[in-house]
Amino acid sequence: MSNKENNFFLLAGPCAIEGEEMAMKIADKIVSITQKLNIPYVFKGSFKKANRSRIDSFTGIGDEKALKILERVGKTFGVPTVTDIHEVSDAEMAAQYVDVLQIPAFLVRQTDLVVAAAKTAKVINLKKGQFMSPESMKHAVQKVLDVGNESVMLTDRGTMFGYQDLIVDFRGIPTMQAYAPVVMDVTHSLQQPNQASGVTGGRPDMIEVVARAAIVNNADGLFIETHFDPKNAKSDGANMLHLDLLEGLLTRLVAIRKTINEF
């Protein structure tokens, strides 16, 4: 997905699809920014949230309804779309509506799920488990390749550091690039899980720190969850980037990548 200027690509959008209006509003803004900056763009949105800390947390507006919104975003703006899947039965269903199937970090060791996704012939985005080493992701990639699907990428989203924090080991970028293109999930790597409240916290003030380091270290792409009202987002609001801050961040990152490419 990289372009002739060797720019990074971007997977970005809301954590979860909360409705058509919000999805279209966010997509419209990001498409405008990425076109201006010549960044290849994939719209991201979860059609359902199965990995939640509490049973009363928001999980979705309905599978088919959310998937149709993702499809509408893709057709309206002419961009590929990505969503995560959680069960084997999700793979074939979601593949009818989106271009990229994402395996969540908690589930990347689930062979049946990875294989089911790979068999759809869609692009597969494997998120590195918080509990896994970069080297161990070679085996997850191999599961996709063994099905005959060579369209696979890896996304780092941090590694557990104690009970309530994550840390990013940037050595993982070149390590995993030996297996597949590597994306840095900037926002999830700044989560603070296992809070007593049962609601995951985050450090959005550190988004630019992690993003800059990823670009300097030649990550192929970035993954950023963004929303025009993070405080009232129904999922992961604590670590999302406010949509108003996205253009400034991406502008600076493009400038950094341009400089790095000169070395």
Image (cartoon, helix red, strand yellow):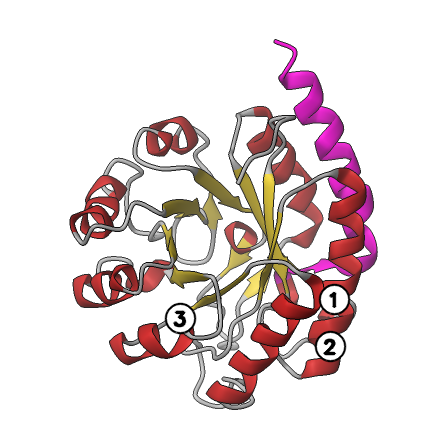
Among numbered discs 3 and 1, the one appearing first in the sequence: 1
Q: What residue sits right under mark 3 in the picture?
A: 95
Is residue 153 depicted above or below 55 in this figure?
above
Whether residue 257 appears in magenta in the rendering, the answer is: yes
Please, what is the three-letter code of the amino acid marked with disc 2? Met
Instruction: From the viewer's side, name the closer residue of 33 and 132.
Output: 33
Q: Residue at x 73, y 77 (%)?
A: 22
Magenta region, residue range: 239-263
**For the residues carrying marks 2 and 3, which lies nearer the camera in this image?**
3
Graded by Cα atoms within 10 Å as few (under 14), some (14 to 19) or many (20 or more), the crowding at tag 3 reads: many
Q: Secondary structure at mark 3?
A: helix
**To which residue does mark 2 refer?**
22
Q: Position of residue 189 (x, y in %)?
A: 51, 50
Q: Position of residue 56 (x, y in %)?
A: 49, 90
Q: Quadrant of residue 209?
A: top right
Using residue 144 as the reference point, say whether residue 182 is left or right of it: right
**Residue drawn at the location 71% of the way across and 49% of the way down:** 205
Residue beneath disc 1? 26
